[in-house]
């Protein structure tokens, strides 16, 4: 317990950005995701919507029934990722040891930052204040602890805009954890929780007091040992700063099954642009493109194409996506279309030949794609659009 770990989680991030940018929605229930009359789920929602029982991953139709007066808005990932970059830049001012968990969540190891910025609680307060000031009022909840498990647990305790500090003495940690529901332990999902509760293990304290043999008989020796370690607050995992995504993908579920090939193609092209933009923002290249189609009867197929050299430009990605789509006749209406890339790398896996005309063309495509990214970030994502066949 000689480390100082922060877990920082932006509060209702997507919905909070929407409320910030639309003052008329502040104080109202806001749901980011599909409309209630469409297929799809809730991506996230404001705390006003959560008061009506709306939750992430809930079908939008159910969210509409629970909160019919909510404002439903589609996700705007380009805008959310721009704000995310602001937030992560703030983290980087306090420590280089930052492990991204998602666009709105990260672990920070601030053990070596005390001389410059004060103790862990002071650093957490300074980061929260900087986020609020530099993002025009967005808030984050922070957990401060000696390891990642406890910090993550703490950040969830006093949302929104909360700061929770976990004690360091072993006996105080046991008392901190004891009353919590057993489902708060990492790895305890709905099925495992029900299994434990039927056996009489309802709180973390019950796991602390359990005999190792009886818990192992119920869950297996490995799982039992893992849960008892967490129940004591033990977690020796490091903050990982060189974490890389291995793939990127986007999907679109049609409101009604779509038999119009041109519409499917247009949606697919839009998905490739979003994947390409995210690739370039992460300074990554992709070796393989993947197409996903789900028919109206839920049968799903995937097709992929491997590039001669890793790429990141929209033009090459769109060509690959459309070629894969053209190779699959739409024999049934389409329920879902998706596009993704795998084999991500920080540089090209093959060195392009100096006098290769293809290499020059690829460089031009990347430069143009990055220019369009910059223009969209400056003037808005909807100001520049490409026709589906360009």
Image (spheres, helix red, strand yellow):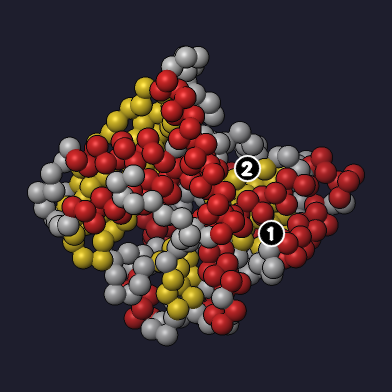
Of the pair 167 and 325, the residue shown nearer to us: 325
* Residue at the image position 54 percent from the left and 70 percent from the top: 18
* Residue at the image position 34 percent from the left and 41 percent from the top: 318
Lower sequence index among marks 2 and 1: 2
Of circles 2 and 1, the one toward us is 2
Residue situated furthest left in the rendering: 331
Residue situated furthest bottom in the rendering: 69
Of the pair 233 and 102, the residue shown nearer to us: 102
Residue 301 shows up from this direction: yes
User: Considering only vertical position in the picture, is 269 above or below 24?
Assistant: above
Position of residue 218 measured from the top left corner of the image (x, y, whole percent): 40, 47
Residue situated furthest right in the rendering: 115
Q: Indicate left or right for 375 with 314 as reference.
A: right
* Residue at the image position 57 percent from the left and 67 percent from the top: 17
- Work out how far the residue at label 2 is from the one at label 1, CA to CA, in angstroms: 14 Å
Under tag 2, what secondary structure? strand
Residue 279: numbered disc: none
Position of residue 258 measured from the top left corner of the image (x, y, whole percent): 18, 59
User: Considering only vertical position in the picture, is 279 above or below 183?
Assistant: above
Q: Quadrant of the C terminus?
A: top left
Q: Quadrant of the N terminus?
A: top right
Q: Indicate left or right for 99 with 247 as reference.
A: right
Residue 99: numbered disc: 2
**Which residue position is annotated with label 1?**
142
Near mark 2 (Cα within 10 A), the count class, few <14, some 14-19 or many ≥20, is: some
Position of residue 44 measured from the top left corner of the image (x, y, whole percent): 47, 66
The mark total stands at 2
């Amino acid at each position: 317990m000689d480390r100082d770990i922060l877990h920082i989680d932006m509060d209702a991030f997507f919905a909070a950005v929407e409320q910030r940018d639309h003052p008329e929605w502040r104080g109202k229930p806001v749901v980011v995701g599909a409309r209630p009359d469409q297929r799809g789920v809730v991506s996230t929602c404001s705390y006003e919507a959560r008061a009506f029982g709306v939750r992430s991953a809930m079908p939008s139709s159910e969210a509409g029934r629970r909160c019919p007066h909510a404002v439903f808005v589609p996700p705007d990932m380009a805008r959310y990722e721009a704000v995310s970059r602001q937030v992560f830049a703030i983290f980087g001012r306090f420590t280089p040891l930052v492990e991204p968990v998602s666009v709105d969540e990260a672990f920070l190891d601030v053990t070596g930052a005390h001389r410059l910025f004060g103790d862990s609680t002071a650093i957490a307060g300074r980061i929260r204040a900087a986020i609020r000031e530099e993002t025009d009022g967005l808030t984050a909840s922070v957990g401060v602890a000696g390891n990642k498990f406890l910090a993550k647990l703490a950040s969830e305790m006093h949302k929104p805009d909360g700061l929770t500090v976990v004690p360091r003495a072993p006996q105080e940690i046991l008392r901190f954890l004891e009353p919590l529901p057993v489902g708060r332990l990492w790895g305890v999902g709905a099925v495992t929780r029900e299994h434990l509760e039927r056996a009489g293990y309802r709180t973390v304290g019950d796991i602390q007091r359990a005999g190792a043999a009886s818990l192992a008989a119920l869950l297996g020796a490995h799982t039992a040992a893992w849960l008892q370690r967490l129940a004591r607050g033990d977690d020796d995992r490091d903050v990982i700063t060189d974490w890389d995504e291995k793939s990127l993908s986007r999907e679109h579920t049609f409101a009604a099954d779509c038999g119009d090939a041109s519409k499917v193609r247009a949606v697919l092209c839009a998905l490739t642009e979003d994947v390409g933009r995210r690739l370039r923002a992460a300074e990554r290249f992709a070796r393989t493109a993947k197409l996903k189609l789900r028919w109206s009867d839920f049968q799903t197929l995937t097709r992929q194409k491997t590039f001669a050299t890793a790429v990141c430009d929209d033009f090459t990605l769109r060509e690959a996506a459309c070629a894969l789509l053209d190779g699959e006749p739409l024999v049934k209406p389409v329920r879902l279309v998706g596009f993704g890339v795998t084999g991500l790398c920080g540089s090209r896996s093959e060195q392009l030949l100096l006098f290769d005309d293809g290499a020059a063309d690829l460089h031009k495509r990347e430069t143009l794609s990055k220019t369009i990214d910059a223009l969209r970030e400056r003037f808005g994502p909807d100001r520049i659009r490409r026709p589906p066949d360009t």
